[in-house]
Amino acid sequence: MQSVGEGVLVMNTARQIQLFNPAAARLTGWDAGSATGLDYRLVLNLRDAAGSKLTDVSDPISQVWKSGKNVVSTDLTMETKAGRKVAVQISLSPIISNNSITGAIGLFRDISAEKEVERQRNEFISTASHEMRTPVAAVEGYLSLAMNPAVATVDDRAKGYLDKAHSATQHLGELFRDLLSVTKMQDGHLAGEEYFDLGALAADAASDMKFTAQKKGLDVQFGSADEKVRKDNSILPVYAVRANPQRIREVIMNLLENAIKFTAAGSIRLSIGGTNDSVTVAVQDSGIGIAAEDVPHLFQKFYRIDSSATRTIGGTGLGLYLCRSIVEHSGGRIWVESKIGEGSTFKFTLPRQASEKIVTKKAETMPAAIPTVASAAASAAPNSSGGVMTDIKKPVAAR
Ligand code: ADP
């Protein structure tokens, strides 16, 4: 412990430091003698991503006490005794003796340099994607015009090439849009959290997706196990949550889009339910299903399953990664239950809030895409990507 490069501390269940190694002293500026016996939060002076001091609830150690498992946090900032702010990774593990937790061991290290490299990389990707979206939207617009028989005349062979170019451009636009969302997510641009009714938002998303599903001969049903039927009106309880409603809507839309994409026949069901503490949304399909070995990787960046069933279906592999980032950032969890050939159910939960917290304003919907030459012409043009994603995913840059 004396020679370990990482800061190591041992605390009791009252969070008082019992042991403090030389690296911990070097990183914090506190010597072991003064640190011993003090609350570890006071010595490390930790702040969360929003810059607020850790409360008993936001302190990652509270999860260790609750779960009895190791918890790793990479978005905390430590302030040294001299007032220097340092991004730290801290890993906290319970010390268990005779089946009860008697304390915890914490390992921490300075990750400021890694964070800076990540920030620069994100900034580069975000600027590049933003700049490239405009010319891509222009190319897509002109291709749509060239394919529109009311505007231009092309022979069948040329139309085939244009079709391919159009769908490749659409894919490129989607990729830029998803990359931008990912970098925004990583930069913590999730402001705009508010209290809203997740039930109303989910019902709205389901009805918006009905049309897209119908184009493929599928139906999107919406319901809840907690539904109370009064005369002929279904009344849903209020499922209050606190998050950014536009981003959560993006999550539901993404899951519904995937369900439609990977289902050839049958139906899609969006349901919502809750306990006192949490609200769960489930998107169930009767599609191709997912093999058990792919499940652990599904929510990773750029992961796409390469099989004969999926090879012809377009996508960027960023959708589920984004869903996970948004849900986890909002204090929730996302997972999938699936069997190959029998369909999949994607579920996510968010912490439930008191319904009185929702103020009069109804959950907003995503801003509609600004119509451009591309979108106007595309509505008249045949849809080369199979007609599934166009309405929702179509990236149209404001020009
Ligand atoms: P994309 O759909 O753009 O490829 P996602 O991150 O949304 O990216 O999904 C990653 C992969 O997970 C998909 O390529 C697909 O192989 C698989 N997948 C996602 N949703 C489903 C589903 N409902 N049924 C079967 N496979 C799915």
Image: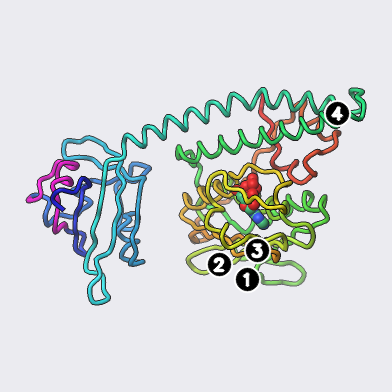
Residue visible at 7% across and 51% down?
A: 33
Spatial CA distance of label 1 from label 4 is 49 Å
Q: Contact (CB < 8 A) between labels 2 and 1?
A: yes
Which amino acid lies under the numbered mark 1 shown in the image of this protein?
Answer: Asp
Q: Amino acid at mark 4?
A: Met
Query: How is the model colour-coded?
Result: rainbow
10 Å neighbourhood of mark 4: few (<14), some, or many (≥20)?
many
> How far, Cα to Cα, is label 3 from label 2?
10 Å
Determine which residue is flagged by label 1: 226
Kindly identify which residue carries mark 4. 147
Q: CA distance from mark 3 to mark 1?
A: 10 Å
Q: Which mark is residue 274?
A: 2
Label 2 residue near ligand 1, CB within 8 Å: no
Q: Mark 2: give few (<14), some (14-19) or many (20+) Cα within 10 Å.
A: many
Q: Which residues are magenta?
A: 17-33
Q: Secondary structure at mark 2?
A: strand
Residue 18 is at least partly visible in this image = yes
Q: CA distance from mark 4 to mark 2?
A: 48 Å
Q: Amino acid at mark 2?
A: Gly
Residue 282: where, in percent of width, then height? 62, 62
Residue mark closest to the camera, 3 vs 1: 3
